[in-house]
């Protein structure tokens, strides 16, 4: 039997499972509430972040159900789209098999009106409970079905006549596997009686901030009186919710400011020489820096001179020229007598960086080392020796750089390209490669620059997000933005084309190739495993090679060995192949200016930023470029919108904004590193006024050196963050 959650036909599956105390039969509740091993329950709670009594107390309802009143079936039927509770006697109970198996129960209330309750998933025990003549309370939305008013999968319970009604709205908690509403409610109620109620805010402050007291606010949210303005509860605008949001935001602000202070207490290599190498490098560049590049370079240069480590995110649209800026930052480190390391997420990208940087730097006498996992043992050992002795001044590589065996002599600057592709831990490991011998954990109590030294960090990302958003969301991170493309780029024309017209597209690329242009052909998946409609890269390669006999067609995909991949890329860079069929491995970083045509198959399956990144592979040279988005219709509304946006703009920031609208910030930024991830109740955008209050209070508390303030900070952070704070230090 399918579970209610699996059945898409159930009108409100979530409501069904969340209103467990009503829906679940008494028998079921017993098994759920009494787990076999007591330790197991604690584990399940812990998985949910529920450990201390205060954790439970702060596990606030996601929504509320109103079981404080009973209305007639007639009245319930009139409340369109709103749930209500009715009570009646069972007048019929049978299982029907047409059009599908379902349990049909009719009840009649005192006025004699009938209501049909329909259960598509049900237990045999439920059928037995609802014998004719039993009294039932049911809660749900009434719809007008074939047999008159009906509730599909209502919450229900058996009652005796005149059984008392709930006095308060019933909270519905965020629940999870093995944690039913009943279990949560019990544990929370216990905690409410057990915890030490201390308001972390002094009364005077609370009054000035016009905030409710902590304990009454919490109690109200768990047990709201039935006459409360329900709207303010569900919209979370009630003063009790405001108090929770403020507290939460205060914790976030305190934590971010402390992380910043901790970073500033750490020492850093002083990279204060912009000398010979930097100057020579600028002289040899075949182009002048754009205004935006100059601006961000100035920001980075100033940071590198500081006595605490830089932590800066360099954002720039694809093709905006981040690599040169990174190279100039590295030059400053080398000029100052330190090593610099650049880490990229894929071997192809790392190799491209290596070639480019070595091409620029080696003629100027810099020794550049290359380290990836695919190197032979001996080569790896050689590279590691160079890195360890300090002979290698600039090191480029993949994750291999963060292996235990890699030791740097004096690492001054860490550059991470496509930073969002690395985990927090990976970035941390590379940074810690530069810790000095006596290096211990950073402490907020040390004066600026006196702690152990950590290298400066420059993170790069081609997924641009609006600046203000970046500042609010990323904890303790400076942000630089390159908002201008190098001159002479021709705009990319983007077309969305139905898959049916593939033949025409092939003709078009044939013509373009004959004119000396090069083409990327991107396929979403390599093997026909999950989605059969997907044209595989290998198939496409075969068909294109056959359709274009006069051209050379290459193939690169994620399953190839790095050396094979590189050979294919090299052939494309040298224009020995004209068409490159690729999976999304070419998504980031690949730079072949002569490529001016991009075909993306099944474009409807890609996300906006991915499409934008892929498109950014063309339009890098002087020739007019085009991007053809092949799609398979019919398009859903979101996919249609994405393709429209792609046609309308090539501005990465604009696209990022739209992407944000479609996806929401949490997912967009990667939950782990966004400040929003710490927030359960407040919303950084809609609760801006509370954010400002919290920011002021945090500022005051940290600047005020009194023991009282320190105590408030400690108590408040412990209550709200516990272990979560670590994430902010990265
Ligand atoms: P991304 O920001 O996507 O990493 P790259 O650093 O790869 O961009 O730069 C894209 C291309 O533009 C490269 O070929 C690079 O050499 C070139 N480029 C960078 N800066 C300039 C500039 N100021 N003028 C002209 N070309 C530039
Ligand atoms: Mg790049």
Image: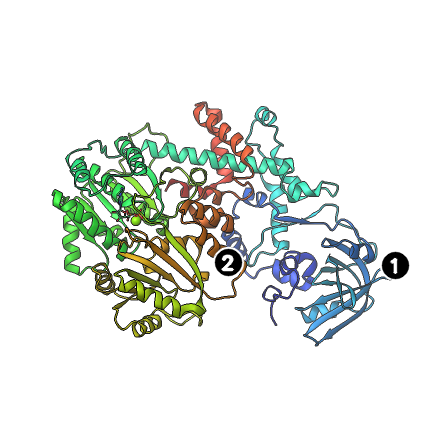
Residue on which the image places disc 2: 640
| Residue at (76, 55) in percent of width and height | 85
Q: Residues within 10 Å of mark 1 (few under 14, many from 20)?
A: few
Where disc 1 sits, the SS reads loop
Image quadrant where residue 325 sits: top left
Image quadrant where residue 576 sits: bottom left
Residue 436 position in % (x across, y down): 23, 38
Considering the image in quadrants, where does the N terminus appear?
A: bottom right
Residue 558 visible, this orientation: no
| Residue at (64, 66) in percent of width and height | 9
Considering the image in quadrants, where does the C terminus appear?
A: top left
Q: Is mark 1 within 8 Å of ligand 1?
A: no
Farthest residue toward the right?
111
Eyeballing the image, is 637 above or below 392?
below
Disc 1 versus disc 2: nearer the observer: 2
- Which disc number belongs to residue 15? none
Farthest residue toward the bottom?
97
Where disc 2 sits, the SS reads helix
| Residue at (66, 68) in percent of width and height | 121
Label 1 – label 2 distance at C-alpha: 52 Å
Which is more toward the observer, 325 or 147? Answer: 325
Residue on which the image places disc 1: 111
Q: Residues within 10 Å of mark 2 (few under 14, many from 20)?
A: some
Q: Earlier in the sequence, mark 1 or mark 2?
A: 1
Mark 1–mark 2 CB contact (< 8 Å): no
Residue 437 position in % (x across, y down): 22, 39
Residue 701 visible, this orientation: yes
């Amino acid at each position: 039997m399918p579970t209610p959650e699996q059945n898409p036909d159930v009108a409100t599956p979530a409501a069904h499972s969340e209103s467990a105390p009503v829906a679940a039969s008494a028998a079921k509740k017993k098994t759920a509430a009494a787990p076999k091993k007591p330790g197991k329950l604690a584990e399940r709670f812990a998985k949910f972040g529920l450990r201390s009594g205060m954790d439970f107390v702060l596990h606030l309802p996601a929504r509320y159900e109103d079981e404080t009143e009973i209305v007639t079936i007639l009245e319930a039927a009139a409340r369109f789209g709103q749930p209500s509770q009715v009570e009646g006697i069972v007048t019929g109970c049978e299982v029907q098999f047409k059009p599908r198996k379902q349990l049909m129960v009719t009840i009649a209330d005192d006025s004699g009106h009938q209501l049909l309750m329909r259960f598509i998933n049900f237990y045999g025990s439920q059928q037995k409970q609802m014998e004719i003549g039993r009294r039932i309370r049911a809660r749900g939305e009434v719809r007008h079905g074939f047999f008159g008013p009906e509730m599909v999968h209502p919450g229900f319970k058996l009652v005796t006549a005149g059984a008392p009604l709930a006095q308060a709205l019933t909270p519905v908690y965020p629940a999870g596997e093995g944690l039913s509403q009943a279990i949560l409610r019990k544990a929370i109620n216990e905690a409410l009686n057990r915890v030490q109620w201390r308001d972390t805010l002094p009364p005077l402050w609370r009054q000035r901030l016009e905030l409710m007291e902590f304990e009454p606010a919490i109690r109200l949210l768990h047990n709201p009186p039935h006459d409360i303005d329900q709207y303010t509860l569900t919209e979370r605008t009630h003063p009790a919710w405001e108090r929770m949001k403020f507290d939460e935001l205060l914790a976030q602000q305190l934590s971010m400011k402390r992380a910043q202070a901790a970073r500033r207490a750490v020492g850093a290599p002083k990279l204060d020489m912009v000398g010979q190498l930097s100057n020579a490098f600028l002289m040899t560049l075949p182009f002048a820096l754009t205004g935006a590049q100059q601006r961000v370079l100035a920001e980075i240069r100033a940071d590198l001179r500081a006595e605490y480590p830089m932590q800066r995110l360099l954002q720039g649209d694809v093709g905006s020229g981040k690599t040169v800026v990174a190279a100039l930052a590295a030059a400053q480190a080398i000029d100052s007598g330190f090593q610099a390391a650049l880490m990229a997420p894929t071997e192809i990208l790392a190799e491209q960086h290596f070639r480019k940087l070595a091409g620029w730097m080696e003629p100027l006498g810099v020794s550049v080392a290359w380290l990836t996992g695919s190197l032979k043992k001996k080569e790896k050992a050689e590279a590691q020796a160079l890195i360890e002795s300090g002979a290698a001044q600039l090191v480029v590589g993949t994750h291999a750089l963060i292996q235990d065996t890699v030791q740097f002599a004096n690492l001054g600057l860490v550059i991470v390209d496509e930073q969002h592709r690395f985990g927090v831990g990976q970035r941390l490991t590379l940074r810690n490669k530069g810790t000095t011998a006596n290096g211990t954990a950073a402490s907020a109590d040390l004066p600026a620059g006196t702690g152990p030294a950590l290298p400066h960090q420059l993170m790069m990302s081609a997924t641009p997000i609006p600046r203000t958003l970046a500042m609010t969301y990323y904890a303790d991170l400076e942000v630089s933005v390159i908002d201008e493309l190098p001159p002479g780029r021709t705009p990319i024309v983007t077309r969305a084309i139905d898959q049916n017209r593939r033949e025409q597209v092939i003709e078009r690329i044939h013509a373009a190739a004959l004119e000396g242009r090069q083409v990327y052909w991107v396929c979403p998946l390599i093997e026909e495993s999950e989605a059969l409609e997907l044209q595989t890269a290998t198939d496409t390669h075969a068909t294109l090679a056959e359709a274009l006999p006069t051209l050379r067609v290459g193939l690169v995909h994620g399953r190839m060995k790095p050396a094979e991949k590189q050979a294919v890329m090299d052939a494309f860079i040298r224009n020995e192949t004209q068409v490159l069929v690729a999976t999304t491995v070419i998504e980031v970083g690949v730079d072949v200016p002569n490529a001016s045509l991009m075909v993306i198959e099944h474009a409807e399956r890609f996300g906006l930023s991915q499409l934008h990144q892929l498109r950014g592979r063309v339009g890098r040279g002087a020739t007019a470029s085009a991007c053809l988005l092949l799609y398979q219709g019919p398009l859903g509304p979101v996919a249609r919108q994405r393709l429209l946006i792609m046609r309308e703009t090539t501005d990465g920031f604009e696209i990022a904004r739209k992407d944000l609208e479609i996806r929401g910030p949490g997912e967009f930024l990667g939950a782990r590193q966004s400040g929003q991830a710490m927030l359960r109740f407040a919303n950084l955008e809609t609760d801006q006024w509370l954010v400002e209050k919290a920011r002021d209070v945090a500022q005051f508390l940290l600047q005020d050196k009194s023991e009282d303030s320190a105590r408030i900070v400690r108590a408040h952070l412990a209550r709200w963050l516990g272990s979560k704070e670590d994430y902010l230090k990265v």
